[in-house]
Structure formats: C-alpha cells, structure tokens
Amino acid sequence: MKPNKVTFSKDMKNDVPTTLLIFLCQWVFIMLLLPSCASASCDRVDRDALLSLDFKASSPLNWSASSDCCLWEGILCGPDDRVLHLWLPGRGLSGSVSPAITNLTYLTHLNLSQNTLLGVLPDGLFSSLFHLQVLDLSFNRLNGHLPISSNEASKLQIVDLSSNYFNGTIPSVTSGSLTIFNVSKNSFAGSIPISVFCKNGSNHNNLTFVDLSFNRFTDPIPTGLASCSKLQVFRAGFNALSGHLPDDIFGLADLQQLSLPVNRLSGPIGNGIVGLTNLKILELNSNQFVGNIPSQIGNLVRLEKLVLHSNNLTGAIPPSLNNCTNLSTLNLRVNNLTGELSAFNFSTFQLLTTLDLGNNNFTGKLPQSLYSCKSLTAIRLASNNLQGQILPEIVALESLAFLSISNNNLTNATGAFMVLMGCKNLTTLVLTKSFLLEPLPNDESLADLDGFHKLQVLAMGGCKFTGQVPTWIAKLKSLQVLDLAFNLITGSIPGWLGSLPKLLYMDLSNNLLTGGFPEELCRMPSLTSKEADDKVERSYLELPLSLMSRNGTNQQYNHFSQLPPTLYLGWNSLSGNIPIEIGQLKFLHELDLSHNNFSGSIPVQISNLSNLEKLDLSYNHLSGAIPASLTALNFLSFFSIAYNDLQGFVPSGGQFSTFTISSFEGNPRLCGYQTAQQSCSLSPPSPPVFAGTQRSSNKIPSALIFGITFSIFLV
Ligand SMILES: *[C@@H]1O[C@H](CO)[C@@H](O)[C@H](O)[C@H]1NC(C)=O
Ligand SMILES: *[C@@H]1O[C@H](CO)[C@@H](O)[C@H](O)[C@H]1NC(C)=O
Ligand SMILES: *[C@@H]1O[C@H](CO)[C@@H](O)[C@H](O)[C@H]1NC(C)=O
Ligand SMILES: *[C@@H]1O[C@H](CO)[C@@H](O)[C@H](O)[C@H]1NC(C)=O
Ligand SMILES: *[C@@H]1O[C@H](CO)[C@@H](O)[C@H](O)[C@H]1NC(C)=O
Ligand SMILES: *[C@@H]1O[C@H](CO)[C@@H](O)[C@H](O)[C@H]1NC(C)=O
Ligand SMILES: *[C@@H]1O[C@H](CO)[C@@H](O)[C@H](O)[C@H]1NC(C)=O
Ligand SMILES: *[C@@H]1O[C@H](CO)[C@@H](O)[C@H](O)[C@H]1NC(C)=O
C-alpha cells in the first residue's frame, strides 16, 4: 500500500468575469499562505501525535513540523485530513511505541511489522483506536500483556502480533469482523481464546486464518470453534494443549489446514475428521493420540500432507488412504502401527515425495508397490520388522535421495548394494542393523559407472558384517559420513580413507581392526581445513538418520550438526603410537581411540585440536606424562585417559577442573588432585598460563545448539 494524500476536488465556483487585479490578489494571497496552508491541512492533533511518536528510523523519515503530515512517508489521510494509515513496515524503527499513538483516534490501518520496536504497548491502545481494522506489529521485540479488555477493538479485521515477546492471557474480547488472527511465536498463556475469534451463535464470522503456534497455551481446546464456520487454517502447534480434539472442529467444512503438532493432546483422533473433506494439511504429530488411524481417512481426497508421527497410534494403515492421491508427505513414524506393509497399495501415490513409516511394528517384505511412486525423494522404513531383499525395481525411483531401512531384517547386502548403485541421486543410505553376519559387499564394480557418486552418508553399522573395509568406498568422493561401527571387520584401517575429500564423520569403532593409526588419516581434508565446520552448519536432513551410538544402540539424528566432526576408532585392536601428525586435525570435535592397544606417549600435538569436545584415550597402554597443554582445550567436556600406564602430575586448570577421578583412574603412577593418590614425590610443575583463557561456557558448541533445536523428534 502506497501512502498517499486523498484529495477531493472542491467545486470552485467561477463567478462573473473577474478582474486581473482580483486574480493577482488571490495569487499573492495563496503564495503567502502556502506553507502554513499546507501544514494546516493535516489535523494538528494527529500531526502532534505523530511527532510525539519520536520514531527513530534506519534512514530519517521526512516528518517535519513545517510540512503537511498527510504527505509524510507512511501516512495516509482521509477526507477530513485525519490520519487513517500509519504504515512503516521494515523501516528500521527502534525504541518503544509512545502513548502518543493513542491520540491517532481515526487510525484504521497500523503496520509497524519487521522493525525492532521493544517494550510494552501503551495502555488504552485498543480503546482509543476503536476504528482500527488492520493491526500488524509482527516481527518486533514487543513484550508485556495486551492492553485490551472486552468490547474493545470490535472493528479489527486483521491482527498479526506474531514473532514478538508478548505474554499473559489473551482477554476474551469479542470481534465479529476478524478474518486473520496471528499471534504465533510469542509467550501467550492460558486457554485458547476462542471467543476472540468467533462470536458465539453469530453467522457474521469471517475468520479464515488462526495461528497460535509457538506459545504457552494450555488446557483442552475449548468448544466453540464450530462458530468459526469460515475457518480455513487453524494452527496451534508447539503449545501445551491437552485433552481430546473437540468434536466441533469436525464441523468446519472449509478447513484446509489443521496443525496441532507438539502438544499433549490425547484420546483417539476421531472418525469425525474424515468429514473435513477440504483438508490439505493435517499435522497432529508429537501428541499422545491413541487408537487407529480413522478407517475412512481416504475421504480426505485433497490431503497433501499427513503428519501423525510420534503418537501412540495402533492398527494398520487404512486401505482407504490410497484414495488420497494428492499426498506429497506421509509421515507416520514412531507409533505402534502394525500389519503386513506389502498389503498396502502405495502405487496410487504418484505425487508422494516423502514417506516415513519408521519406528513402528510393520512386518512382511518391502512393499513392491512403493517402487511405482515415481516422485519419491525420501523413504524411511527404519526400525520395523521388515524382511526380504531390496529389489532391482527400486531404480525406477529416479529422484530417490534418502533411503533408510535400518534396524530391520533384510538379507542379501551384496545384492542390495548392486541394485542401489543404480539410484544415481542417492545422497543418504542408511542400512544399519540389518543383514546380520553377511560379508561386507566388496565387489569392485560397486561405485563404478557413476554409482553412489552423490552419496554423502553411508551407514552400515551394527550389521555384524565380516571382511575388510571395502575398497570401493575410496571412490565415494562426496562422502561426509561413514558408519561401519559394530561389525566384525578385520584387517587394518586403509590409508586412503584419509584422502576422501569431504569425509568428516568416521566411525570404525567396535570392530576387529588391527595395525596402526594410519598417518594418512591425519590429513583428512575436511578435518584439517575450515571446510568441516562450515559444512556442519548448513547441511540439513530431510528425515532423521539412525547411526550406531557408542554403546551399540541406534542413535537418531535430525540434523547434520548433531554429527560433529568425529573420528571413532575405539574398541578395536589397534596398536603402535598415536602419530604426532594428529595435531593437524584442527576441526575435529570428537576423538575416541579407547579400548585398543595404543602405546607410547600422548602426543602433545593433541593440544592443538582446539575444537575438541570429547577425547577418549582410555584402556590403552599409553605411558609418560599427561601433556599440561591439554588444559588449553577450552571446549573439552569429556576426557578420559583411564586405564593406561601414565605417570606424574595431573595438570590443573581449564576444563581439567571439571573432570572427576573416573577420567584418570587405573593409572597407579598418576598423582595429584583428581587421583586417588593425592601427593606426589616430586613438587608439582607450575600450571601453564594461557593468555586470554576463555572457558568453553563462553561459546556453546554449535552441535549442542542445533542438537537442542532439532531434537524434538528424539524419543
Ligand atoms: C516524503 O516521502 C514520501 C516517499 O517516501 C513522498 O511520497 C512524500 O512526497 C515526501 N513528503 C515530503 C513532505 O517530503
Ligand atoms: C505490513 O507490511 C508488510 C511489509 O510490506 C507486509 O508484508 C504485510 O502484509 C503488511 N501487513 C498487513 C496486515 O497487510
Ligand atoms: C503467522 O506469522 C508467522 C510469522 O511470524 C508466519 O510464519 C505464519 O505463516 C503466519 N500464519 C499464518 C496462518 O499466516
Ligand atoms: C501406548 O499405548 C500402549 C497400549 O495402549 C501403552 O502400554 C503405552 O504405555 C503407550 N505409550 C505411550 C508412550 O503412551
Ligand atoms: C476410494 O474411493 C472410491 C471412490 O472414489 C471408492 O469406491 C472406494 O471404496 C474407495 N476406496 C477405499 C479403500 O475406501
Ligand atoms: C541378491 O540380490 C541380487 C540382486 O537383486 C540377485 O541377483 C541375487 O540373486 C540375490 N541373491 C540371493 C541369494 O537371493
Ligand atoms: C547410549 O548412548 C546414547 C547417546 O550416545 C544415550 O542417549 C543412551 O541413553 C545410551 N543407552 C544406553 C542403554 O546406555
Ligand atoms: C600448534 O599450532 C600452532 C599454530 O596454529 C603451531 O605454531 C604449532 O607449531 C602447533 N603445535 C604443535 C605441537 O603442532
């Protein structure tokens, strides 16, 4: 909307022929009065109010006392020169909203969104601005309660207060004119204020969009929604709503989106939902719903997104679902769904791009009808009881990028890899905990002919695979994550692993590997250059990834950054010295060499791994002293050198003051504060001093931040 002065043609009565003199007089008169005339044409009360707002903008507003305020940037006046619109979104406004705004009593449109306004809204805002129709204060830093009480603001049509810090309850004002009500991303509490949206029993309700998500609303959803008969979008996810879905939601014939994820809703979903035949998006994930998926769900023929994951749903996938031919996302993971998966006919889902049926109790073979869903880009069937083989027909899924069938009972790994090589767009392949006791696929032709050339994640841990690390992996130039943990792999660690250009997470732990720590690993390009850190922040996973955790359980990751740059070689039979070149892996966050036969001393160069958060060297034969410079590792949160043959003083200072005796036990010749043997025969060396030492608490590791942000799914 462009600010403009609304002008009205005044009927200029042209009287009898006027003399030149009169004309000139008029002209002079106008010239003399022009400046004051102009400023006078804007209502003085409004002009004073606007000037009192005292807005600081990123570049100055042309608001000057000497000119007509109706011509100012962001202002639109009405016929009687009263200010109707104050419209300054994204103008870099800072400071708070002055109480002077309540003097703009003719205001109908107020848009100050996308600024950095802070503080509370002035008292009386709503009672004074009773002509207000459009109010958009979204994307600011406003806080406090809404200064509104009942029967105010009855003309409001559009309210967008989203993305601020407002709190308190929303008073039950009634407005029959609301069409859009968005208060998402605030801290509002209490029950959902149904009466705000829709007048009970009135048929003048125009409300179409309601967004209450990301607040602190509690209690069951009150009845009364049925009066919002024109509602198209209802979003209230990420709150603490409880109780059942109220039946009157099922009467909202126009509803296109119902999104209530991440609440505490319970009970059955209810068959009534199949009456909402205009639904395109149904998101009820991460609640406590029980019972079956309504058997007539297929009535929702417009459905594009069905997201019911992380509930306690039981029974089979209703056959009628295949009538939902517009589905693009079907996510039912983490429920107790059962049944023979191949009994369901997936072939009608020609638009389906994302399918997640993981963490259920589905049985039977991999459904062959799935291979005809040509649009699929991501499939996750992990953690079910599926068996059989991956069939060659899967190559028909030309867009397939993400495939996770881990934690099932598949067979024929070699066949599976030969077949999957044909899926040219695969970036993520997760086949952990399946194929028990088969030989590692090691056919040299794998990864030839462009096969797997886009593969970034290859997870084959926990399969008890036998054989040596397959050489075809050397051809996977895009590989970032390699998980071969918990297998029965023999032989030594091949040096070529150190030259995979993008590799930044490698887990070879819990195998039968022998030989030394190859020096080539110290040159892994992604761990020696800045690239590693950069990559971790920007990559994202379409669906969760299951890798082997260090204790052998399936660990699920929702975001790449939960996978810090890592080298896990623990629980093998590796021997020899830890190479001093290890100090080059500057971007490594986690290093586990525990439970091996490494000997020699701890290389002082490990102190150069300044990003290290976890260092486990326990259960080896390391000897000599603990390098005092290790105390310079500011981010170290886990450290163990237990059960070695180390001696001398345990250094103090830095993160070392947070480690307990368990980090050092099993080294009878160690002495000092954190050991059983407190006194040393020699006098302690003076602790090293590090200039500008910063504690790790000053910089929370990025992995932790993203881990928390994206761990909602983790159950
Ligand atoms: C102020 O700026 C707006 C455009 O941002 C312009 O339309 C208006 O004419 C200007 N008014 C004055 C008094 O300079
Ligand atoms: C407020 O202005 C922003 C930026 O121009 C715009 O995107 C938004 O739609 C406006 N709000 C309303 C309610 O029109
Ligand atoms: C409400 O506002 C948020 C931004 O704060 C936006 O992401 C969301 O789409 C809006 N909701 C609706 C229903 O338009
Ligand atoms: C899911 O339901 C089953 C049986 O109804 C019950 O035993 C189990 O505790 C429920 N789990 C959760 C997480 O609610
Ligand atoms: C799918 O819809 C058709 C009509 O469009 C209906 O005859 C059929 O029974 C439905 N299928 C299921 C499994 O409900
Ligand atoms: C393993 O899979 C391949 C490829 O699908 C197939 O040719 C082969 O017959 C399978 N082997 C067995 C033992 O089923
Ligand atoms: C295994 O380790 C993961 C983290 O790596 C942890 O969340 C889980 O609780 C552990 N499980 C057991 C059984 O120790
Ligand atoms: C540690 O790194 C610094 C510079 O980054 C370098 O000067 C020093 O030689 C390195 N120390 C070791 C022990 O590698």
Image (cartoon, rainbow, N blue to C red):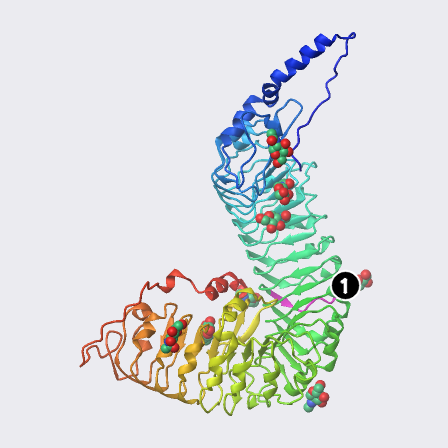
Query: Closest to the observer: 249 or 479?
Result: 479
Residue at 58% x, 64% y is 310
Residue 213, image x, y percentages:
57, 51
Q: Does the magenta segment cover residue 316?
A: yes
- Element marked by disc 1: helix
Residue 584, image x, y percentages:
44, 77
Residue 87, image x, y percentages:
60, 36
Residue at 54% x, 47% y is 163
Can residue 108 be seen here? The reply is no
The quadrant where residue 651 appears = bottom left
The quadrant where residue 656 appears = bottom left
Judging by the rendered image, the residue that carries numbered circle 1 is: 323
The quadrant where residue 364 appears = bottom right
Query: Closest to the observer: 109 or 218?
Result: 109
Amino acid beneath label 1? Asn
User: Height in image: 537 above or below 246?
Assistant: below
